[in-house]
Image (cartoon, rainbow, N blue to C red):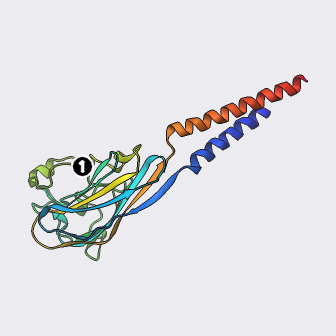
């Protein structure tokens, strides 16, 4: 019975150790201007230097609110401070197949959350629940990153042949969250202006590093051993 109680206590300590050290934070990205330069591959880079967060990344999501412009012109990616890279948007709708266009989709903006658990990629969103997902001219909902890794100035045929989902947000998992995060946005064709309506938010969750957890388990095992040894000594006396 004492051994069972010791194991239960050890399990509770292990669970408490893991839970106590899980951390989450919202990174709000701002810049001197929130207008995406029209027809300019140099684009707009929004950065944030995160400091003092423990553990390694276990989950990342991104909220993006852009209005105006022409969705088929836009390219966006997120880069982490210590590895991890995800193409969020890459000329949505550009292609030569059914439901695609040489210039991409003409909708004016996105108010979306990017998550690896989203319904699907945005690359050809007009073929999935559209136009119900369009609100106030913006495409809405929770989506997986497009992950189309070809040059955003590639031909429509190249987009049709490209594979999506190549750079999921899980590419950040296991890395140190501290340092400079960069969200890059660019408009690759002349026309209407796209504006970042509200600052994009990166939601980062971390878990304890494996070494920290193993030390905690080792401590529990040592304490359990000492407890059993004392019990045996007392029974012998």
Residue sticking out furthest to the right? 237
Residue at screen point 72% across, 32% down: 224
Q: How crowded is the residue under tag 1: few (<14 C-alpha within 10 Å), some, or many (20+)?
A: many
Q: How many marks?
A: 1
| Above or below 161: residue 199 | below
Residue 67 in the figure: left or right of residue 218: left
Q: Nearer the viewer, residue 84 or 167?
A: 84
Taking the image as drawn, is residue 223 in sight? yes
**Residue 25 x/y as whole percent:** 46, 59
Measuring from the top left, give residue 96's x and y in whole percent. Answer: 10, 55
Q: Residue at x 84, y 25 (%)?
A: 233
Secondary element under disc 1, as helix, strand or loop, is: loop
Which quadrant of the structure image shows residue 3?
A: top right
Q: In the orientation shown, which residue stands out farthest toward the top? A: 236
Q: Is residue 116 visible?
A: no
* Quarter of the rendering occupied by the C terminus: top right
Image coordinates of residue 155 in percent, x first then y, are: 8, 53
Q: Is residue 11 left or right of residue 23?
A: right
Residue matched to label 1: 164
| Image quadrant where residue 199 sits | bottom left
- Residue 78 at x, y = what percent? 29, 55
Quarter containing the N terminus? top right
Placement of 109 over or under 10, stated as above or below? below
Residue 203's quadrant in the figure? Answer: bottom left
Q: Nearer the viewer, residue 125 or 77?
A: 77
């Amino acid at each position: 019975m004492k051994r069972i109680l010791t194991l239960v206590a050890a399990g509770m300590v292990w669970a408490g150790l893991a839970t106590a050290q899980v951390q989450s934070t919202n990174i709000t990205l701002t810049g001197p201007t929130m207008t995406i330069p029209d027809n300019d591959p140099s684009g707009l880079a929004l950065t944030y230097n995160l400091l003092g967060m423990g553990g390694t990344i276990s989950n990342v999501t991104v909220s993006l609110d852009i209005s105006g412009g022409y969705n088929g012109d836009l390219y966006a990616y997120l880069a982490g401070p210590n590895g991890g890279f995800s193409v969020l948007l890459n000329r949505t709708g550009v292609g030569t197949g059914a439901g695609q266009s040489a210039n991409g989709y003409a909708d004016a903006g996105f108010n979306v959350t990017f998550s690896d658990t989203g319904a699907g990629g945005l690359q050809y969103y007009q073929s999935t629940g559209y136009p119900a997902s369009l609100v106030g001219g913006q495409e809405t909902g929770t989506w997986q990153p497009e992950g189309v890794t070809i040059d955003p100035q590639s031909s429509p045929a190249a987009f049709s042949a490209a594979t999506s989902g190549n750079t999921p947000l899980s590419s950040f998992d296991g890395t140190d969250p501290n340092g400079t995060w960069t969200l890059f946005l660019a408009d690759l064709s002349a026309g209407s202006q796209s504006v970042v309506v509200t600052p994009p938010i990166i939601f980062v969750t971390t878990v304890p590093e494996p070494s920290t957890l193993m030390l905690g388990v080792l401590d529990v095992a040592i304490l359990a051993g000492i407890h059993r040894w004392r019990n045996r000594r007392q029974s012998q006396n």
